[in-house]
Image (tube, rainbow, N blue to C red):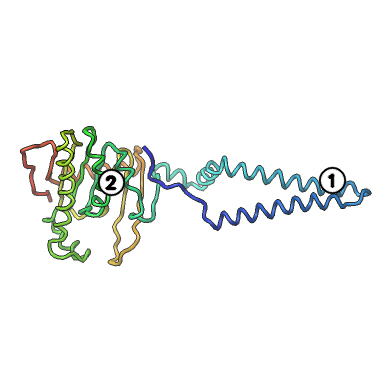
């Protein structure tokens, strides 16, 4: 599966500094070679020294460029390992960090995943902005979507509504909109006589402490902001790794479904009505 990590580009300032340093080095080398031609014939040692310095600068510059192009990543890994950072990153399974949740490319993860889990409050915009990605994902019978929403009957629902500045009933409406969007996609695909993905929706009453998404073996953790003012929310992406952060996220989600949530919708339970009450 392709990563949602965007290609890291050199900062413009670093690029211009690199160009300036390269130009200055070339100027110095050609200056030395040109100046060596004016050294009197009775000073062959001086001329040889100047030419050797120019050759050394040219050679070292080329070697440095090759090293940066070919082994820069390995060198960075070496230094991170030397100061103990790489070991911690490896143990956690950390794959990527994006500083802005709204700029993170979830679309490619949705389209290329076979199994998706999500633990959210209402995900109204998150699902709505990616409806085409979900349409593609749900068009495969072998795919599976498990999503757990906050129940509108939760004791924390009024508190969260107040913190989000929602009007009365707005939180419930957003939850319903997300569920209806998913169900409508299932119905739309079924009209084409195609088999759809297996979709299950739960509701739970526990106070949410973070948002969680899983795309096959990639786990996405999104914290909530504490301040009332809107702030940029980071995204932490982990690969599945035994003993890593993925273990905690996966087990927590499974425990919530088993102990604190009630099944609200199952796309393969035609004609049956799952319990509509979320566990406490």
Name the side, left or right, on which 48 lies relative to 62: right
In x, y percent, where is residue 238?
A: 36, 44
> Crowdedness of circle 1 by 10 Å Cα count: few (<14), some, many (20+)?
few
> Badge 1 is on which residue?
48
What residue appears at the point 18 percent right and 63 percent down from the top-left corner? 161
Q: Secondary structure at mark 1?
A: helix
Query: Which class describes the residues within 10 Å of circle 2: few (<14), some (14-19), or many (20+)?
Result: many
Q: Residue furthest front?
A: 192
Indicate the quadrant containing the N terminus: top left, top right, bottom left or bottom right: top left
Residue at 91%, 51% (x, y): give it: 40
Question: For residue 194, which quarter of the picture?
Answer: top left
Q: Which residue is mark 2?
A: 213
Q: Determine if residue 165 is in view.
A: yes
**Residue 156, visible in the rendered structure:** no
Where does the image place residue 82, in percent across and percent down from the top left? 53, 45
Position of residue 214 in the picture relative to residue 174 (left or right): right
Q: Is residue 209 left or right of residue 274?
A: right
- In the displayed structure, 19 sits above or below 90; it is below
Q: Which sits in the foreground, 11 or 157?
A: 11
Q: Is residue 13 left or right of residue 247?
A: right
């Amino acid at each position: 599966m392709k990563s949602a990590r965007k290609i890291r580009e050199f900062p413009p300032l670093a690029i211009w500094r690199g160009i300036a340093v390269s130009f200055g080095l070339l100027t110095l080398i050609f200056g030395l070679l040109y100046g060596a031609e004016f050294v009197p014939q009775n000073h062959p040692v001086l001329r040889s020294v100047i030419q050797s310095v120019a050759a050394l600068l040219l050679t070292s510059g080329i070697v440095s460029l090759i090293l940066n192009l070919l082994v820069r990543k390995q060198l960075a890994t070496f230094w991170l390992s030397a100061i103990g950072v790489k070991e911690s990153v490896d143990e956690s399974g950390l794959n990527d960090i994006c500083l802005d949740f709204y700029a993170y490319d979830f679309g490619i993860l949705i389209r290329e995943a076979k199994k998706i889990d999500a633990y959210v409050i209402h995900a109204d915009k998150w699902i709505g902005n990616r409806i085409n990605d979900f349409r593609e994902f749900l068009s495969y019978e072998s795919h599976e979507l498990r999503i757990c929403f906050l129940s509108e009957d939760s004791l924390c629902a009024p508190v969260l509504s107040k913190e989000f500045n929602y009007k009365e009933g707005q939180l419930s409406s957003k939850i319903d909109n997300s569920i209806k969007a998913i169900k409508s996609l299932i119905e739309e695909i079924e009209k084409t006589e195609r088999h759809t993905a297996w979709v299950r929706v739960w509701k739970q009453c526990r106070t949410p402490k973070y948002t969680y998404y899983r795309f096959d073996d990639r786990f996405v953790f999104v914290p909530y902001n504490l301040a009332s003012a809107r702030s940029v929310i980071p995204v932490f992406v982990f690969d599945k790794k035994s003993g890593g952060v993925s273990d905690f996220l996966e087990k927590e989600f499974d425990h919530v479904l088993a102990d604190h949530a009630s099944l609200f919708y199952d796309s393969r339970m035609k004609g049956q009505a799952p319990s509509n009450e979320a566990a406490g």
